[in-house]
Every structure is written in structure tokens, then in C-alpha cells.
Amino acid sequence: MIHLKELDYRTLADWLDKQGQPAFRQKQIYEWIYGKFATSYDEMKNLPKILREELSTEFLPFSLEVVSRQEDDDKTVKWLSQLRDGNTIETVLIRAPKRNTVCISTQVGCKVHCVFCATGKQGFKRNLTPAEIVDQVVLASKEIGELVTNVVVMGMGEPLHNFKNLVEALNQITSPDGLGLGARHVTISTSGIPKGIRLLADQGKPWNLAVSIHAANDELRAKIIPPPHRAKLDDIKEAINHYRERTGRMTTLEYVLVDNLNASNEHAQQLADLAHDCHAKVNLIPCNSDNPMFAPPPPDKCEKFLGSLEKRAVQATLRMRKGKGIQAACGQLKQQVAKKDE
Ligand code: SAH
Ligand code: SF4
């Protein structure tokens, strides 16, 4: 069934006309799906019942069926949603006093297979459609009764491996005719695909870019991201610089800290040099894994790593993990539910 959000304006206008409906119905429908985050036709009370019935036989109003919802003490909410084909994806809402950030998925699984990532282990199933991506923002906005303030594309999947649908979805999320979120409030996190980063830059939108770098030399990085999806650091650097030149945005380098792997003082020094080379800031993320091979360094060591970057004049943060109690890291909820089912 065609998704309502994937219909272009003209097609819906013509369809409504064919049903003998006045043109203003279209505005009402968009107001429901983008302004009031409606997920069913039943909610669209100002549409005639007959029209709601006709719409429901032709177009899908929402693509996600929530199969589990977990809320943590810090109010982080994590959903596992089933798609029409039975696959499941995760979405996380992270709340702060003035900020509601939704972390969305772009693929079922992922092809990249970073060693510490639960999503990578699940293998790759398929790309999400634009509507499946947009609907995660709708789900989170509906939860809080208003549009989220920020969207981070940091859930399951490598967004730049699903480039076309990602861009279509982001355009719908940021268009005044769609959800209308400011483009500067969107961040796309990638494992570092130079061609994709360049293409993204060429969209000319001030979306923020985050690159999961994890290591500042190719040899070490090879231990974290296996071939064939790992690019050379020099190529990634060039792509990041291109991104900045085209969009004016400063990139964030994400660095998952793993004890006895990439967390030494020397690694911090190399990372500082890399950050300077691409005028980037750094976000340190202590690894969150139950595999002892990928344990996070103790807190004082993480702080020391941070201090070492700051000493070299790199703008850096150490991410406090929200939603720890509900396993709010890449792909972990899905794994948990799968375990329960076994
Ligand atoms: N595929 C994209 C976006 C999704 S992953 C990417 O890799 O950037 C979002 C972030 O979570 C990435 O920086 C990724 O490295 C990180 N991540 C994955 N597994 C993790 C884990 N077990 N602990 C901490 N961070 C993890
Ligand atoms: Fe894929 Fe990102 Fe997980 Fe790596 S960290 S396997 S790129 S989702």
C-alpha cells in the first residue's frame, strides 16, 4: 500500500478531486499528519467519515506498529516498532529541559559491522523507506505533544548507504510543508563514507555531520571497522573539509572509547591532530557493551583522554549515556527482545 507521506502533492490533489472532495481537504490532511502527528485516520475528526474510509483503503497513514516501549528514570523512551514486512527497528527519545532529541534508524541492520556495535551483528536486511524514517520523528513528537527540537540520525544503520531515502526523509522533516524542523537541528552520523559525505554536502543544507572516527590512524581503525566499508582516513578528512566548505558547518568526530584499544594518551594526541586537520570537534562515547573485549575505560581514564584533547585546544565533550537502564545504545533493545523470544 502506498504511504500517505510518500504521495506527492499533485497526486493527492488529483485523487481528492476524483473523490469529489474540495481542495481544502488536502490542507486538513497535512495538518493532521505533520501538525498534529496523527497516526490513524480515526483521529482526523474534521474529515468526513466516508473520506476517511476511502483514504484507508488506498493509503497508509503510518508505517510503524509499536511492539515495545520502555521508559527510563531519566525519561528516555525507547521504542521497538514493527514494519509492514515484520522487520523491527528502534527509535529513542532523549529528553532534556529545553531539548527533545529523537534518535532515528535508517536501515534494518547494517552492512558496516563495527566490532562493538549490536546493529552490525544483526546483519543487513533492508533500507528504510522515506516514510518509515519520517514516521519515527512523528512517533516521538506525538509522545511529547509537540515537534521534537532535534533529530539525530544515529540509530540503526548506515544512513549514507540509504542516501536517496535519507535525503527525501530529511527534506520532509525540515520542509515547511512537512514537519518544519529547522535544518540546523538535524545531525547525520556516518561511519565515514567519503562519497556519501560529498553528496550530502552538495545538497547545500545546513545539516550537521558527525563522523564515527574511533581511531586517528588507519591501522587502529582497521581493528574497529572491517573492510570493505572502511575508507582511508585521508579520504574521510578531505570529504569532511568539503562538507565544511559547502555547508559552513563544523563536523563532530565521534570516538567510542574502548579500554586497551584506542584510549591511550598517544591516541588522544593523534585524535587532536586529526580534529585540527578537519576543523572538527570531538564527542567521546565510552563504549557500552557486555563483551569484555570492548569494555569502556574507567571514568578517570575517560576524563584524562578528554583533558588531553582540551589541552591541545580541541573542543570536546564526554557523552553521558542517557537511558542506560533501557540499553539505549545502537541496536541493543532489538537484541534484548530477540533474546527474550529465543
Ligand atoms: N551508522 C552510523 C550511525 C549509527 S551508530 C555511525 O556508525 O555513525 C551511532 C553511534 O553509536 C556511532 O558513533 C557508533 O560508533 C556508536 N556505537 C555503536 N555501538 C556502540 C557501543 N556499543 N557503545 C557505544 N557507542 C556505540
Ligand atoms: Fe553500522 Fe553505525 Fe553500527 Fe557501525 S556503528 S555497524 S556503521 S550502525
Image: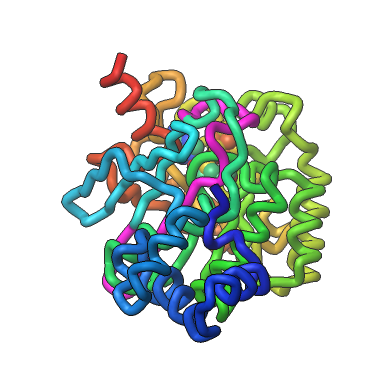
In the shown orientation, is residue 235 left or right of residue 68? Answer: right
Q: Is residue 44 visible?
A: yes
Span highlighted in magenta in the image: 94-118
x, y (%) of residue 260? 49, 26
Residue 110 vs 308, above or below: the answer is above
Along the viewing direction, whichever of 259 and 34 lies nearer the viewer: 34
Residue at horizontal 46 percent and vertical 29 percent from the top: 118
- Quarter of the image with the C terminus is top left
Q: Is residue 104 magenta?
A: yes
Q: Is residue 274 magenta?
A: no
Residue at horizontal 72 percent and vertical 74 percent from the top: 248
In the shown orientation, is residue 195 left or right of residue 254? Answer: right
Residue 105 vs 122, above or below: the answer is below
Residue 229 vs 127, above or below: the answer is above
x, y (%) of residue 91? 40, 48
Residue 253 vs 124, above or below: the answer is below
Q: Is residue 300 visible?
A: no
x, y (%) of residue 135? 46, 56
x, y (%) of residue 175? 59, 75
